[in-house]
Amino acid sequence: MTAPLERTVNPQELDPQTVRLLPYPFAKSKGVIAARVVGGALEVWVRPYPAGTTLSEVRRMAGKPLKEVLLTPEELEKGVRHGKSEAPERDEDRSGQVDMRDTVVRQ
């Protein structure tokens, strides 16, 4: 894992289609937002000190390399709230796994 890039983000940069890659409860509890796809990598906004297992799971779910952007806890909370309002909840199958078959990621 490379060191996360620190920058100020604008919740308006969130791509609603990409945000739906991660269920809201997962994003909120783990402190990670699938923000958008940039240059073939999934840009994820993360709180300080994300668990390595969290990023591994996001990478597995997305099937793409990750580009981490470190946010303050306040910025992340604002992004999670904005993402929830912009992207309706995904359907989950009975096992609790996210069904990504219909997910389209813009590049």
Image (cartoon, rainbow, N blue to C red):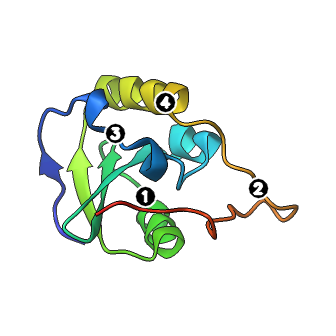
Local packing at callout 1 (Cα closer than 10 Å; few below 14, some 14-19, many 20+) is few
Q: CA distance from mark 4 to mark 1?
A: 26 Å
Location of residue 27 with respect to 55 vertically, above or below: above
Specify whether 107 is left or right of 79: left
Q: Which residue is mark 1?
A: 51
**Residue occupying the point 29% across, 43% down:** 48
Q: Position of residue 39 (x, y in %)?
A: 18, 67
User: In the rendered structure, which amino acid carries the disc numbered 3?
Assistant: Leu
Secondary element under disc 3, as helix, strand or loop, is loop
Which badge, 4 or 2, comes first in the chain's sequence? 4
Location of residue 21 with respect to 56 vertically, above or below: above
User: In the rendered structure, which amino acid carries the disc numbered 2?
Assistant: Glu
Q: Which residue is mark 4?
A: 86
Q: Is disc 4 in contact with disc 3, using a CB cutoff of under 8 Å?
A: yes
Q: Is disc 4 in contact with disc 1, using a CB cutoff of under 8 Å?
A: no
User: In the rendered structure, which amino acid carries the disc numbered 4?
Assistant: Glu
Q: Position of residue 92 (x, y in %)?
A: 76, 55
Location of residue 81 with respect to 67 vertically, above or below: above
Disc assigned to residue 14: 3
- The label nearer to you, 4 versus 2, is 4
Q: CA distance from mark 3 to mark 2?
A: 22 Å
- The label nearer to you, 4 versus 1, is 4
Which badge, 4 or 3, comes first in the chain's sequence? 3
Q: Is disc 4 in contact with disc 2, using a CB cutoff of under 8 Å?
A: no
**Residue occupying the point 34% across, 29% down:** 73
Q: Which residue is mark 2?
A: 92
